[in-house]
Image (cartoon, rainbow, N blue to C red):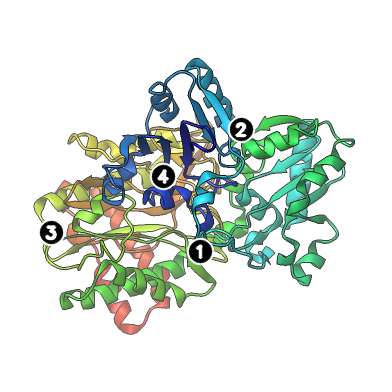
Amino acid sequence: MRNCQIDCYIVPHSDEYQSEFLPPQSERLAWLTGFTGSAGIAFILLDQAYLFVDGRYQLQVKKQVDAEVYEFKKLGAISPFISIFQELSAGMKVGYDTRLHLLDDVDKFTKLSEVYNLTLVEVEDNLIDRLWLDKPIRANNKIYHHNQIFSGMSCVEKVKNLSKELLKNNYEGYLITSPDTLCWLYNIRGDDTPFTPLILAHAIVLPKENKSIIFIDLDRLDDGIYNSYLKFVEFVDEKEFDEYLDKLTGKIKSIAIDKDSASAWVCKKIQSKGLNIKRIQDPCAFTKSCKNIQEQNGMRMAHERDGAALIKFLYWFDKEKKSNEITELKIVEKLEFFRGQGEHYMGPSFSTISAYGSNGAIVHYTPTKESNKLVNGNSLLLIDSGGQYLDGTTDVTRTLVVGHASAEHRLRFTQVLKGHIALASIKFPRYTKGGQLDVLARSYLWQDGMDYDHGTGHGVGSFLGVHQGVQRISKGSFGGELSEGMVLSNEPGFYKENNYGIRIENLVLVRSSSFYNSDDKREMYEFETLTLVPIDKKLIEKNILTQTEKDWINEYHEQVFRRVSKYLGHEEKNWLIQATSRI
């Protein structure tokens, strides 16, 4: 920092593509601080260091990061840039890497720097990269085609639809900077990031020519991919991005960019060529969020196989838990084993949360050799896991009792369950946003003065991101309008620090409801539950359930048995009969 003549350096948890799960070579924040959560930002001064994390990671950060080196702060309503900039002295210089920040974000903290009389410095060679001597090498795996039997629509049709939308809004070109959108649009996948089958690349769509240019390392293209896309996609080496922009300068005057994924670096590169930037919301985002019929059916089938894997695991766990040899890491290993037996399985959709007792109170806990607990005694085990299948993406959380459940365990679990059922059962009018439904999941906890510090639901992709889309269910953000074909999670929870954690999560599909008010003529939607895994009945306090709630549980368990039992062996099926018996 002294060599660069800067007084503060910003280290965000991000990469050049704003990925959720960063590739190993981009885990700069983790290398610097030890913090492995998915949301954080550090400000390094010459004599101080600050680390901001959100509510999910308040416990985790204390376990992973040296409090003598970093002062911990909570990401919240006040921007971390305001918190830090107001502490700096006028005239100080603040360095940052333009590749790791959105253009909108740079604009915001540039204005703040002017308010506090600070100077921003663009540091071309990332300071962490200069120090990280054993930095992992970027993956260079082959890309592959995602068959239309899974995607439900050809990439030619998708690009045509996008081009029509761009022309309607008079956009001469569109720069695709979201790998998720790129992979969805062109029906291609790769292994550039953990847990999500993405290719880290850029593309440009020129709607008047109905032409696409994908910038990528050409060595990654085998003849099959290259030849099958040759008629409608031009592949250009990613190192020639700058030169290709020069060619466009005479053809078009402006390029639209997705303001939620385009880095400041790529935007400034375009502007340096004399092209104007038009900041828009990704025109693919809504369509990508609404699964077509083929994708919906694929999600249903993937959840059947995923449910079978979880039930095989639960049968194994029930049989082996008295051995006092099961650990959190052993559970991760067994889940991967059972999922791996299923058709079309490609790997986990995120790092499995296997959290026993007090570890369950850490919302995004991941077991390590150092933290690995033996699962014995009397407490709760929280398991949040998911799979990537060629025909769908899964995410499921179950809380299990180990030994004997206390009255408090059963009360809190049942309050969470009641909220889960309320959300799963709701019928709602078209144009409703997810945030308007969030209170349903929290209300039974609120009545007892309790809450949880994470969203209730996130969007899910189809063999793409487990966190994806414009849809969400949260008290902090209403998200986009819920529409037919969207997949979301339904995951209320409760966490008692240093004691236990509870979460019940199913994925749900938005579908048209048969419920219809003939007087009002209002179109109604409802949720179809996709996840097919029994809920631990030993944790249910039946006397605080309504008959309607009992009926929901019984009907859900009947569906689990009806659809999943065909995948099971004799003993596993007998176990499932008991696990799904009526309450």
Q: Earlier in the sequence, mark 3 or mark 2?
A: 2
Label 1: how many residues lie within 10 Å, few (<14), some (14-19) or many (20+)?
many
**Quarter that holds the C terminus:** bottom left
Mark 4 to mark 1 CA distance (whole Å) = 19 Å
Q: Residue at x 35, y 48 (%)?
A: 491
**Which labelled disc corresponds to residue 103?**
2
Looking at the rendered structure, which numbered label has been put on residue 405?
3
Q: Is residue 104 above or below residue 337?
A: above
Q: Earlier in the sequence, mark 3 or mark 4?
A: 3
Q: Is 479 displayed left or right of 265 in the figure?
A: left
Type of the residue with mark 2: Leu
Q: Position of residue 277 (x, y in %)?
A: 72, 30
**Contact (CB < 8 A) between labels 2 and 1?**
no
Q: Which mark is residue 527?
A: none
- Report helix, strand or loop for mark 1: strand
User: Distance of mark 1 from mark 3, alpha carbons?
Assistant: 33 Å
* Residue that protrudes farthest toward the bottom in the picture: 570
Q: Quadrant of residue 374?
A: bottom left
Q: Residue at coordinates 23% horizontally, 35% vertically from top-left? A: 446
Q: Which mark is residue 457?
A: 4
Disc 4 and disc 2: Cα gap in Å? 28 Å
Along the line of sight, the residue nearer the viewer: 379 or 94: 94
Q: Give the number of marks.
A: 4
Q: Position of residue 44 (x, y in %)?
A: 42, 37
Question: Which residue has dot 1 on it?
Answer: 388
Between disc 4 and disc 2, whose residue precedes?
2
Residue situated in front as seen by the camera: 60 or 84: 84
Disc 4 residue type (three-letter): Gly
Q: Secondary structure at mark 4?
A: strand
